């Protein structure tokens, strides 16, 4: 069976697998767990802050135009560091890079808590995102470098759980912290764990050695091009939907810089002696497909983490604490599905796991196409459970397929690219979702308004009944109040219909991807252990 299931190139990829597979030094296990916790902090920090932007805005006396930069600065800086971390890890070693990343992230968190105006906060958040971004790919690379394939059924669900759980529970944690204490604790909560993670990383990580000779070959033009390309792309995707895309001057300028940066970046990737990012990993078919799937999972992961709170806030009128309480179910579903996904990855074909995950996700979003304004915790329960379970069933095989057959010398660069695809998927997904929500809301409002005009008998009857109700309330202009109420109902229904359109779009996307899985080759090592069954 083994000869039938190993893909080309996977056998020599892990010479270390010949060593005693079941023995791992406790030092390395503890070091890896510290790295996983550091990655959890870095990913969680995005969402716990996004859930409490209103509190931060009030605390810093920032305008509604300025406050989104608290998030945008972090995301732009992080998306530049993630692919860069592969080169830095080879040059400095995992130990040095991860320690600097953990210590810098912690220091920037403490600084963010001391910010007294919006400008300081934006600078500190950019530093936090850039330095903290180095932790995320390092964990994925370490998982597939230091652990033998027989351990992958434990390790892959662990990093998959952190990568998906952290964004999902962020609104819950953020809402609780900002309500129970103050927005400063959104950042201060990182300080003690960050110091412990940095100390553990420096003391325990011994996976590799630095190669300082690479510094003389550092491609500065490649870095400038990549920063301009990815940073401006993140800004365009973040701000475009709300400013009519290229009609806004800042978005247009960033789109031009993005194009120029992209040309410089890709030119240097193919001509530099030591490019900032090595794209050769995409020649591995499994990695290329895994990255594609990771991109789409990013759309689903960050898209729904955005959509549910917007629905509950805009339609149901929930605050951040109530939203968090309503949405913790997805996180619980992920947590309990992770060990099941690990066991299944060694028992069944990874393609079947992914297909179950994609169709499960599509079922959850299809359920949401029947949305009404009355939907609450219990109506959202089944879609959230489907979302959480399906996300874990997707992530574990995707991690194994993408990174499980690469040779060790390619893993550091490939891990940065793999994580970048998920982040870019989230950014592209949110841009598309926002655009669809805005456009379809306008479309549905126009269609509904046609039925609520003065010539409509049903509308006239409804308005007269509402006016009579308001006349019974003293101190109100009944006619004006009735018209205002009717207008609000039309706006609400238009918003609901636009949400349903987005959920239908996500259903079609994930159902299509579930079918697309049939066309990929059987992954290495039946069952997804990456060779654990040999």
Image (cartoon, helix red, strand yellow):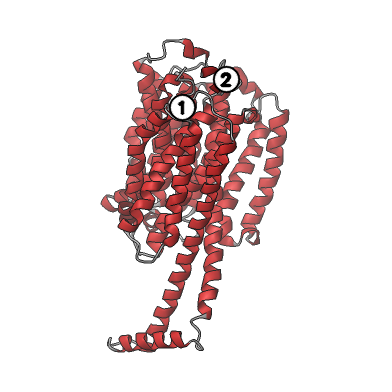
Give residue 12's quadrant in the image. top right
Q: Which residue is at the front of the view, 300 or 325?
A: 300
**Mark number, residue 409:** 2
Q: Earlier in the sequence, mark 1 or mark 2?
A: 2
Residue 291 appears in the picture as rendered? yes
Disc 1 secondary structure class: loop
Foreground mark, 1 or 2, reads 1
Residue, x 41% and y 10% (percent of image)? 20
Q: CA distance from mark 1 to mark 2?
A: 25 Å
Q: Residues within 10 Å of mark 1 (few under 14, many from 20)?
A: many
The x and y percentages for residue 510 are 51, 47
Disc 2 secondary structure class: helix
Residue, x 36% and y 64% (percent of image)? 316
Q: How many marks?
A: 2
Q: Which residue is at the front of the view, 150 or 166?
A: 150
The x and y percentages for residue 413 are 57, 28
Residue, x 54% and y 32% (percent of image)? 416
Q: Residue furthest front?
A: 1
Position of 101 compared to 259: left or right? left
In the image, residue 311 sits, relative to residue 345, either above or below, namely below
Give residue 315's quadrant in the image. bottom left
The x and y percentages for residue 230 are 60, 42
Position of 181 compared to 169: left or right? left
Q: Which residue is at the front of the view, 134 or 470?
A: 470
The x and y percentages for residue 390 are 42, 42
**Which residue bears the numbered disc 1?**
527
């Amino acid at each position: 069976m083994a000869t039938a299931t190993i893909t080309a190139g996977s056998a020599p990829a892990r010479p270390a697998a010949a060593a005693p597979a079941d023995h791992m030094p406790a030092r390395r296990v503890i070091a890896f767990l510290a790295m996983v916790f550091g990655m959890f902090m870095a990913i969680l920090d995005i969402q716990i802050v996004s859930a409490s932007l209103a509190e931060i805005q009030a605390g810093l006396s920032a305008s509604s135009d300025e406050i989104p930069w608290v998030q945008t600065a972090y995301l732009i800086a992080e998306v530049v560091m993630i692919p860069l971390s592969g080169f830095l890890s080879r040059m400095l070693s995992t130990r040095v890079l991860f320690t600097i990343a953990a210590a810098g992230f912690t220091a920037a968190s403490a600084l963010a808590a001391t910010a007294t105006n919006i400008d300081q906060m934006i600078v500190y958040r950019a530093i936090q995102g850039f330095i903290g971004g180095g932790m995320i790919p390092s964990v994925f690379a370490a998982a597939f470098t230091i652990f033998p394939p027989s351990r992958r059924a434990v390790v892959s669900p662990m990093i998959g759980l952190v990568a998906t759980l952290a964004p999902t529970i962020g609104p819950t944690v953020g809402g609780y912290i900002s309500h129970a204490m103050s927005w400063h604790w959104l950042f201060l909560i990182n300080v003690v764990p960050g110091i412990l993670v940095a100390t553990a990383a420096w003391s325990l990580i011994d996976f590799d050695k630095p190669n300082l000779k690479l510094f003389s070959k550092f491609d500065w033009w490649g870095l400038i091009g990549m920063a301009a390309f990815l940073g401006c792309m993140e800004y365009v995707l973040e701000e475009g939907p709300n400013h009519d895309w290229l009609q806004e001057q800042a978005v247009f300028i960033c789109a031009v810089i993005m194009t120029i940066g992209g040309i410089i970046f890709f030119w240097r990737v193919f001509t530099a002696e030591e490019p900032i990012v090595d794209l050769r990993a995409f020649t591995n078919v499994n990695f290329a497909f895994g990255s594609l799937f990771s991109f789409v999972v990013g759309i689903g992961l960050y898209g729904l983490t955005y959509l549910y709170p917007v629905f509950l806030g805009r339609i149901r009128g929930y605050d951040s604490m109530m939203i968090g309480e309503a949405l913790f179910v997805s996180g619980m579903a992920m947590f309990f599905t992770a060990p099941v996904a690990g066991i299944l990855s060694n028992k069944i074909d990874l393609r079947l796991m992914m297909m179950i995950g994609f169709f499960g996700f599509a079922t959850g979003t299809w359920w949401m196409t029947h949305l009404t304004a009355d939907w609450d915790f219990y109506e959202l329960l089944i879609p959230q459970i489907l979302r959480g379970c399906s996300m874990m069933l997707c992530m574990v095989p995707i991690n194994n397929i993408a990174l499980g057959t690469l040779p060790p010398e390619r893993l550091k660069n490939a891990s940065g690219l793999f994580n970048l695809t998920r982040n870019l998927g989230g950014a592209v997904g949110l841009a598309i979702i926002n655009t669809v929500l805005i456009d379809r809301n306008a479309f549905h409002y126009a269609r509904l308004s046609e039925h609520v005009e003065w010539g409509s008998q049903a509308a006239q009857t409804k308005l007269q009944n509402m006016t009579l109700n308001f006349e019974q309330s003293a101190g109100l202009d009944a006619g004006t109040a009735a018209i205002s109420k009717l207008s609000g109902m039309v706006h609400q229904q238009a918003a609901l219909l636009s949400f349903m359109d987005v959920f239908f779009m996500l259903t079609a996307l994930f159902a299509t991807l579930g079918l697309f899985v049939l066309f990929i080759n059987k992954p290495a090592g039946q069952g997804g252990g990456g060779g654990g069954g040999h």
